[in-house]
Structure formats: C-alpha cells, structure tokens
Image (cartoon, rainbow, N blue to C red):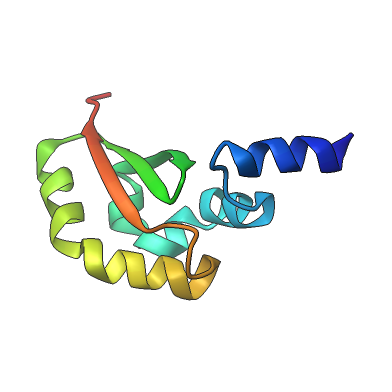
Amino acid sequence: MGDSLGAVARHLGAPPPEALARLFERWDELVGPAMAAHTRPVSLVRGTLVVTVDQPGWAAQLGWLETDLLRRFADQLGADVVMSLVVRVHPG
C-alpha cells in the first residue's frame, strides 16, 4: 500500500517523502533563523515551493535571495527537489 501511495504521489508531482520531511524539519537551518521567523513553507509540487510570509518586505527579501536559496535547497535536499519559489504574503 505504501509503495502504491508513493507512486501516486510522484505521479502527481510530489517530491520524495524524505526530501519533503527534511525541507519542513530543517526550514530554520535552510533559510536562517531571522527569515524563518517570518516565513513558512506551505507546499511543494513539481519543484515549485510555495512559501508564505507575514510582511511584504520578507517577500521582497525572498525574491532577492531566491538564487542563493535554490542553490542551498539543491545542496541539502537534492538537485530536482526545489526548482522555483512562489511567495505569498499572508499577515498573520
């Protein structure tokens, strides 16, 4: 059953479960504590990571750092896990 669910998830664009777990568990380490305090990963489908931020300034900061963050994600999670970012402001 687990193998079947994994195959369906991959077909739908989900990353390997262990990579997804590392992304969520190590978010603070991956983006740094200051950014982690204002951001949250929401979903990861077909290589696109959706991140919510609590203020527009943090959305801009993520945009400026996108290339560096994508490189860090590739180094820590695997080359094809996170290939792009979508940032949404969600005050909260």
Name the side, left or right, on which 79 lies relative to 68: right
Residue 41 is left or right of residue 8, and the answer is left
In the displayed structure, 48 sits above or below 74; it is above
- Image point 23% across, 33% down: which residue? 88
Work out whether residue 74 or residue 11 is closer to the camera in this orientation and state it: 11
Q: In this view, does 27 lie to the left or right of 2?
A: left
* Image quarter hosting the C terminus: top left
| Of residues 48 and 41, the one drawn nearer to the viewer in this rendering | 48
Give coordinates of residue 35: x percent, y percent: 28, 53
Residue closest to the far bottom = 75
Q: Residue at x 54, y 42 (%)?
A: 13
Count of number-bearing discs: 0
Furthest residue toward front: 11
Q: In which quarter of the image is residue 73?
A: bottom left
Residue at x 24%, y 68% (from the top left corner): 67
Q: Where is residue 37 in the image (x, y as percent from the top left)?
A: 33, 46
Q: Which of 53 and 75 is in front in this view?
A: 75
- Residue 47 placement, left or right of 77: left
Residue at x-position 49% and y-position 59%: 81
- Image quarter in which the N terminus is found: top right
Residue 18 versus residue 74 in the image, above or below: above
Is 75 placed above or below 73 here?
below
Q: Where is residue 74 in the image (x, y as percent from the top left)?
A: 45, 70
